[in-house]
């Protein structure tokens, strides 16, 4: 469900320019990312730093106002564990293969009880049938973060190496996947495996959901899986004004890791692309969720102060 009509050519030149350090999807000579960051963004960064001190660990944020190309970036090029946010690209790759005729949406993928992981709500529900279709597994992995569905689809892609190759085909030279679920969630400090940067992840979001990396049909399907996710209500959406909508994908892992990435749709203006990675926190799950929600609120108030205030 695309809620706003975007001039994708203009968007590629303006918004995607900010992620050129890691993603070259725009295929244009982009401006220097540091020049796009507005002076008032420093106030946002101060608030993010305060949240970082409260939650301990590191927070990485990149936000793009797709209407103006303005950017907020903090720890933009540092590596963070992706955890389940990588599933966006799993869904995108599968939908791309279906669109190209390399897979069929109704193709049955067999699995059994031995394949079920600890968090696998949809594959557990359907295990007695002995299979799920490729498209159903895609929705399970992206919308419900089903780990068994994710592993089954990763296998179709050629494993984590296939995931990374798909990322490279989009121009992302940073993000990498090295392991299957649940090992990819280890979040070990200094371990580059299964990591991305806020800038790289934001670039992938821009390309997949608002750019031209996917054809219109797969792009719309991917966003429909992410739109108003049933498992992310405590994250970006929690502190956004009524009437604002979100298509997002969360992730969590060891070492106090909590992430949310996606597109925020204000009711009367252009979308905001936002990545928030947080790792090394010593807070509870609820406290980590609250920090993610507050980051989204701070960004919304920065880019859309009138809309954010009028909707309160």
Image (spheres, rainbow, N blue to C red):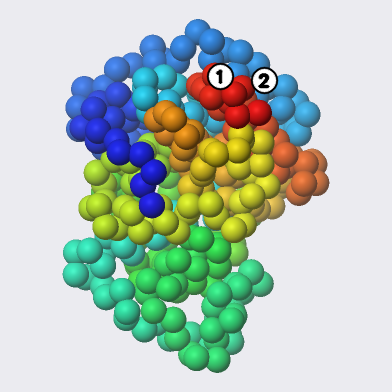
In the foreground, 45 or 3: 3
Q: Residues within 10 Å of mark 1 (few under 14, many from 20)?
A: few
Element under label 2?
helix
Quadrant in which the C terminus is drawn: top right
In the picture provided, is 109 more to the left or to the right than 171? right
Q: Is residue 74 above or below residue 92?
A: above
Residue 187 image point, x, y percent: 63, 49
Residue drawn at the location 55% of the way across and 39% of the way down: 243
- Residue 265 x %, y %: 47, 37
Vertical placement of residue 163 versus 82, above or below: below
Residue under label 1, please give it: 305
The residue under label 2 is 47
Q: Residue at x 29, y 58 (%)?
A: 218
Q: Is residue 264 visible?
A: yes
**Image spot of residue 157 (x, y percent):** 34, 66
- How would you rate the neighbour count of disc 2 (Cα within 10 Å): few for under 14, some for 14-19, many for 20 or more? some
Q: Is residue 299 visible?
A: no
């Amino acid at each position: 469900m695309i809620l706003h009509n975007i001039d994708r050519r203009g968007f590629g030149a303006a918004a995607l320019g900010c992620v050129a350090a890691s993603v070259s999807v725009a295929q244009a000579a982009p401006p220097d990312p540091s020049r796009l960051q507005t002076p008032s963004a420093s106030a946002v960064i101060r608030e993010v730093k305060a949240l970082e001190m409260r939650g301990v660990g590191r927070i990485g944020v990149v936000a793009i106002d797709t209407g103006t190309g303005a950017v907020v970036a903090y720890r933009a090029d540092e590596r963070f564990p992706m955890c389940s946010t990588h599933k966006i690209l799993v869904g995108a790759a599968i939908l791309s293969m279906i669109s190209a005729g390399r897979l069929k949406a109704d193709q049955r993928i067999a699995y059994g009880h031995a394949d079920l992981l600890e968090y696998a709500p949809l594959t557990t529900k359907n295990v007695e049938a002995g299979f799920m279709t490729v498209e159903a597994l895609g929705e399970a992995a992206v919308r419900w973060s089903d780990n068994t569905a994710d592993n089954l689809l990763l296998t179709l892609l050629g494993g984590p190496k296939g995931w990374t190759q798909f990322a490279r085909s989009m121009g992302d030279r940073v993000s990498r996947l090295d392991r299957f679920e649940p090992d990819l969630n280890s979040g070990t400090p200094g371990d580059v495996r299964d990591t991305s940067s806020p800038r790289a992840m934001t670039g992938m979001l821009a390309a997949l959901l608002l750019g031209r990396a996917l054809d219109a049909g797969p792009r719309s399907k991917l966003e429909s899986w992410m739109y108003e996710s049933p498992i992310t209500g405590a994250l970006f959406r929690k502190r956004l004004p009524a009437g604002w909508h979100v298509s997002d994908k969360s992730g969590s892992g060891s070492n106090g890791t909590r992430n949310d990435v996606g597109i925020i749709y204000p009711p009367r203006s252009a979308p905001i692309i936002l990545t928030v990675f947080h790792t090394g926190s010593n807070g509870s799950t609820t406290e980590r969720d609250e920090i993610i929600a507050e980051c989204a609120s701070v960004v919304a108030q920065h880019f859309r102060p009138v809309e954010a205030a009028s909707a309160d």
